[in-house]
Image (cartoon, helix red, strand yellow):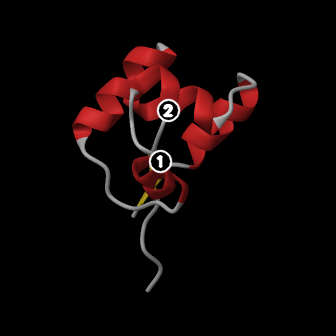
Amino acid sequence: MISYKPFLKLLIDRNLKKQDVMRLTGISKATMAKLSTNEYVSLEVIDKLCTALNCQPGDLLEYVPNEK
């Protein structure tokens, strides 16, 4: 599973609100909700976030193995 917990931590570390990121990137509220619930988002969204936040994809997401 892909987790966007690092993205949420990055927002806290940089004192940014989700609304700030939506304004900077042009991503929708629905896409922001997907990031908050670890749902699929396209690489285009990841690219926009990396550009706006001046970071690498690894700063936004992590792989978490499924527990079986």
Question: Which residue is depicted at the point 71% across and 22% down?
Answer: 14
Q: Where is residue 61 in the image (x, y as percent from the top left)?
A: 46, 43
Q: Residue 29 carries which label?
A: 1
Q: Which secondary structure, mark 1?
A: helix
Q: Which secondary structure, mark 2?
A: helix
Q: Which of 17 and 12 is in front in this view?
A: 17
Q: Which of 29 and 32 is in front in this view?
A: 29
| Pointer 1 local density, CA inside 10 Å: few below 14, some 14–19, many at least 20 | few
| Pointer 2 local density, CA inside 10 Å: few below 14, some 14–19, many at least 20 | some
- Mark 2 — residue? 22
Disc 2 to disc 1, C-alpha distance: 7 Å
Q: Position of residue 40 (x, y in %)?
A: 32, 57
Quarter containing the C terminus? bottom left
Question: Which residue is depicted at the point 69% across and 27% down?
Answer: 16
Using residue 33 as the reference point, say whether residue 8 is left or right of it.
Answer: right
Question: Which residue is depicted at the point 39% across and 36% down?
Answer: 27
The image shows residue 36, relative to residue 44, as above or below, that is below
Given the image, on which type of amino acid does mark 1 rest?
Lys
Q: Where is residue 53 in the image (x, y as percent from the top left)?
A: 50, 18
Q: Locate residue 42: give its quadrant.
A: top left
Q: Position of residue 8 (x, y in %)?
A: 62, 42
